[in-house]
Image (cartoon, coloured by chain):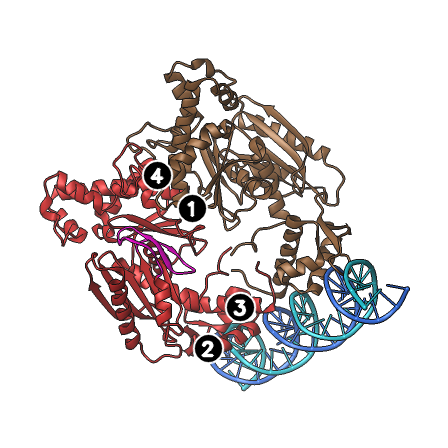
Chain colours: A red, B brown, C blue, D cyan
Amino acid sequence: MRIGNISLVKKMNKQLVLKLIRDQHPISRADIAKTTGLNKATVSALVDELIAEHFVHESGIGESTGGRRPLMLRFNADAGSLVGVELGVNYLYAVLTNLNADILWEQRRSFRPSEGQEAIIGEMMELIEAAIRRAPATPYGVMGIGIGVPGVVHTESGTVIFAPNLRWDDVALAAVLRQRWPERPVIVENEAKLAALGEKWFGAGNEFAHFVYISAGIGIGAGVVLHHQLYRGVSGLAGEIGHHTIDVNGIRCSCGNIGCWEMYASEKYIERRLAEEGRSEWLDDRFSIAAMALAAESDEQLARILEETGRYLGVGLLQVIYAYNPEAVIIGGPLAQAGEYVIGPARQEVRKRILVKKESEPSIIASKLKEKSCAIGAAASVLEAVVLPPEFAAV
Amino acid sequence: MRIGNISLVKKMNKQLVLKLIRDQHPISRADIAKTTGLNKATVSALVDELIAEHFVHESGIGESTGGRRPLMLRFNADAGSLVGVELGVNYLYAVLTNLNADILWEQRRSFRPSEGQEAIIGEMMELIEAAIRRAPATPYGVMGIGIGVPGVVHTESGTVIFAPNLRWDDVALAAVLRQRWPERPVIVENEAKLAALGEKWFGAGNEFAHFVYISAGIGIGAGVVLHHQLYRGVSGLAGEIGHHTIDVNGIRCSCGNIGCWEMYASEKYIERRLAEEGRSEWLDDRFSIAAMALAAESDEQLARILEETGRYLGVGLLQVIYAYNPEAVIIGGPLAQAGEYVIGPARQEVRKRILVKKESEPSIIASKLKEKSCAIGAAASVLEAVVLPPEFAAV
DNA sequence: TGATCTTAGTTTATATAATAAACTAATTCG
DNA sequence: CGAATTAGTTTATTATATAAACTAAGATCA
């Protein structure tokens, strides 16, 4: 039960000031006082502390608006570094960033899915080790490690409860990493949820209080941001909307259900359709939606398959809209590489089927961080945990 | 932008104390201090104010646990009255309650859907007038009026944007009522959302932080409570999940879409199946699920139709579970009168189709407030707006 | 029975942080 | 050049939570 006391007030206001500086820098103390409603003296005191903590610095003198010229403040993105890792189905991708998600170092590494858990976790730890070695000298150093995984996660313990595509089951990933780096916060979370955080902090979700990030690849997952905060549900399953039924009499999904959305609006569907249409030349190891979209410019059959996929995507988006009524839906993951070939038909399908037009239609847009969403989101999760908690932003 | 100051802290703590007294009365000052972590002196000061404001009263001396006997505190449900109104498709139902949702007066009135807006609003105002006249003498009198409507609502203005079954479109309902009762808060909200509030405050939702109330009748609507708060989305459409597609190749819905859930898990479906199976004797004006469920005990054909409906309900519940990952799903509305005939098969269907069993399965339970959910929820919305705002309960 | 221990609740003094108002600093404008 | 304006700091005040001391009223046990 959260009780209020004076230090809570201070924490809230300090966060608010820091957030404002990050979002609107360069900004003066006077502007902060005006936009927040806080007293000038309060702002000065809080800013002084933030400067002492290296999160803010003065960046010179601004333009006068008829009086004394203001001292401009900036968020200090170089107060520390963040490590973000995406654990894919057959690859690892790690980034080292500053607090502004500028990538200072990155590395991608493939593995065969047949490799065991230990081997994969071992490679991940090598990558993290390498990232930490590359970290520049900063006041706080590496502030934490975020990991995105393709499955359902128990966040407190950092355990991967269920990751079908990796065939992982109850793997205590965070425990291993915390043992190796006991002094650093380690966050393990579902990849779509982290990608949503990435888009929220540094991408297409920045301006929205409520949005849904759709990670469409082999399957479909989602990260749901409500009131500026990631929504996880009671056990972290919120957003597993790839298994929404869109055809009760449809085809069987690997999850045991019938007619799941992700059987129709994913790479799985495209592969099935390519095979059906006798275009199996596209079905080799190096299958890529991006290449397919390029070829589709002069290949109607391919274009049609992408368009079908987009329409099915739209059918499911309708459910996303009715469930969450978001301001925006951000389409990410490999499927988003097809760009308007998929997103256009999805938009049309939504417009065709939706109940109340103008009130309810969200912007349906492409991911901004592209294939880096998850890794950057993993880094952002550390930022959120350590520097800029969203708790007070809501309401 | 919410800033912190000392009076915010006081407001938070006072709300917290009042909430605790309401939830756990009788309770002593010492117990409040222990469970909240607030200082005894702080609690005493806040309680004194709450007593002066008539929201709390001392209710005698409790049992000693080895020392001085405590003064027990109770929530004063008779500090004021609440008016709640349900606007159905062809009836009005109004209640007058105390702050504990005990019904002091109620009235139900039918109308023909062909009557115009003005006539219906007129009848509603007569009902409200009658309720206000019946209100007992209390410190605060009638603290406000809540109205549940079968449609999408813009809450700030209290405008009914779209109510297909009433054929209402952009009706400024709250404006009319606020003109008549300018001194009283008037809340207009979707019926399922208010019913969810009702169950949260006084019914089956009491113990859950995240739950979904399903209003299943002619159509399907939902009220979604996340982090103890009603979630509305950006334009109040969140929870319009009756129009989730469960069969892309299915039958056309009145909303323009194809294969909507509410074509399969609603009274509409039952009526269609009754007709198909040649049981149209049930299809008269006084059609009632409750009667049908009773007859189903010795009528397999009826039992089978209810069971089918329940299975379709389960298919859609899966989507609710994946979207919100709630602790519980509460089934209300006319369809819930069929009890286990419908809820049992729904549970089975969910268990059969769900991805991760133990983590994700919510309790699927029947509404506790039954046909009074909406009206009591309308009253509760006033309570929440005026006496017990949920703002600080979250996180 | 009465001394001591416990628990409930109040009073008093103190600490923290926001605020208002007065102040200094630096600039524009006429 | 002086008045007005804007930026930022200093100082005194206020509201509130808290700790600690205190009063109140019971239980326990020799």
Do labels 4 and 2 touch, CB within 8 Å? Answer: no
Depth check, mark 4 against mark 3: the one in front is 4
Chain to which the residue tagged by mark 3 belongs: A
Label 1 sits on residue: B324
Q: Position of residue A214 (x, y in %)?
A: 32, 50
For this view, does D22 lie left or right of residue B90?
A: right
Q: Are marks 2 and 3 on the same chain?
A: yes
In the depicted structure, whether residue B372 falls above or below residue A141: above
Label 4 sits on residue: B353
Amino acid type at mark 2: Glu
Q: Is residue A154 magenta?
A: yes
Q: Are marks 4 and 2 on the same chain?
A: no
Do labels 1 and 4 touch, CB within 8 Å? Answer: no
> Would you call the spot at circle 3 few (<14 residues within 10 Å), some (14-19), or many (20 or more)?
some
Q: Which residues are magenta?
A: A150-172
> Would you call the spot at circle 4 few (<14 residues within 10 Å), some (14-19), or many (20 or more)?
some
Q: Are marks 4 and 3 on the same chain?
A: no
Amino acid type at mark 4: Arg
Label whose residue precedes the other's in the sequence (2 or 3):
3
Depth check, mark 1 against mark 2: the one in front is 1
Label 2 sits on residue: A53
Q: Position of residue B287 (x, y in %)?
A: 50, 19
State the CA–CA distance, disc 1 to disc 2: 39 Å
Amino acid type at mark 1: Tyr
Q: Which mark is residue A11?
A: 3
Q: Are marks 3 and 1 on the same chain?
A: no
Q: Nearer the viewer, residue B341 or B129?
A: B341
State the CA–CA distance, disc 4 to disc 3: 45 Å
> Would you call the spot at circle 2 few (<14 residues within 10 Å), some (14-19), or many (20 or more)?
few
Quarter occupied by residue A280:
top left
State the CA–CA distance, disc 2 to disc 3: 14 Å
Q: Position of residue A268 (x, y in %)?
A: 21, 45
